[in-house]
Amino acid sequence: MSDSYAVVGNPVEHSRSPAIHVMFAAQTGQQLTYERLLAPLDGFEATLRAFAAAGGKGCNVTVPFKFDAFALAAVRTERARLGGAVNTLRFDADGWTGDNTDGAGLVNDIQRNAGRTLAGLQVLLVGAGGAAAGVLGSLIAAAPARITVVNRTVDKAQALVAGHAHLGVPLHAATLADAPAEQDILINATSTSLAGAASPVDARVLARGALALDMMYGPKAQGFLDWAAAHGAEPRDGLGMLVEQAAEAFFFWRGVRPETAPVLKTMRSELGEAL
């Protein structure tokens, strides 16, 4: 009998998570099903409880419910506590356990798939909302020389930095306009790509040959990718991060770690055909 999993969000019909987890299951010989669940904006908890009561074993959580999932988790992993949000739930018998796999997914994509070891590098994290909060702890764990968090309003960046200051890597907060120059890694964790904007920061932030990564993927990321390439950076979208964070969730649920490279290759091919 197959175990049941799902991705829960609103909207959720665009999610590629079902295809990814079906490929992971086939690769590892795990028996599971994975579906999309559209939760009403005022009905996230009810949707989850109904799914769990019907035998669901766990779920991924997407916008706008990651903070709600954090509140519902009886147990939270350290990276979930650091990020203040949960994107993966496991329905354990003695209570729900919440994790946040976004940061590990981002770091694994940068280091494994893009081939950039973060240790000793200058990292610029653009944005101070939930997406940035979910990845900062994992970025720090990779031991870069310095991470600068920039945001339109500097107080949010300062608050995010303050919450992670005890982790041992030099952190700095600034406005978008005061972003430091010559950064080795640029990560766009804002929603600017949703509006088709090229970049929320000036090109002077890019060191020669920098990696410029937008957490968005597909057509919406194209403006940022074109901007990065035009200014001598290596452009990268968020598809690899998506696959890698899914692998972290799969391991969290099943105790088996799938190979991500063939799945990312298939997803990249399918995305190219859809464009």
Image (tube, helix red, strand yellow):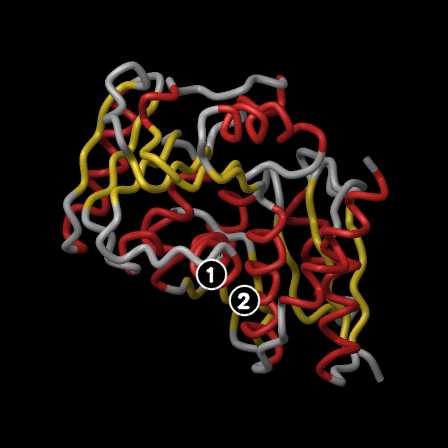
Q: Is residue 226 left or right of residue 228?
A: right
Nearer to me, 173 or 67: 173
Query: Can the viewer see residue 73 in this picture?
Result: no
User: Which marked residue is nearer to the observer: mark 1 or mark 2?
Assistant: 1
Location of residue 93 in the rendering, given as x and y in whole percent from the top left corner: 58, 77
- The kind of secondary structure element at disc 1 is helix
Q: Are marks 1 and 2 in contact (CB under 8 Å)?
A: yes
Seen at 28% across and 37% down, the residue is: 160
- The residue that appears at 68% across and 55% down in the rendered structure is 48
User: Quadrant where the C terminus lies?
Assistant: top right
Is the residue marked by circle 2 packed among few (<14), some (14-19), or many (20+) residues within 10 Å? many
Looking at numbered disc 2 in the image, what kind of residue is underneath it? Glu
Residue that carries the numbered disc 1 in the rendered image:
108
- The part of the image, by quadrant, that contains residue 52 is bottom right
**Figure check: 233 above or below 112:** above
Q: Residue sitting at 52 percent across and 76 percent down?
A: 94
In which quarter of the view is residue 43 placed? top right
Quadrant of residue 221 within the rendered picture:
top right
Q: Is residue 186 above or below residue 140?
A: above
User: Disc 1 and disc 2: Cα gap in Å?
Assistant: 10 Å
> Image check: 169 left or right of 50?
left
Q: Indicate the amino acid at tag 1.
A: Asn
Taking the image as shown, residue 22 lies to the left or right of residue 80, namely right
Quadrant of the frame with the N terminus:
bottom right
User: Which x, y percent locates residue 35?
Assistant: 81, 58
The residue labelled by disc 2 is: 248
Q: Earlier in the sequence, mark 1 or mark 2?
A: 1
Q: Is residue 148 visible?
A: yes
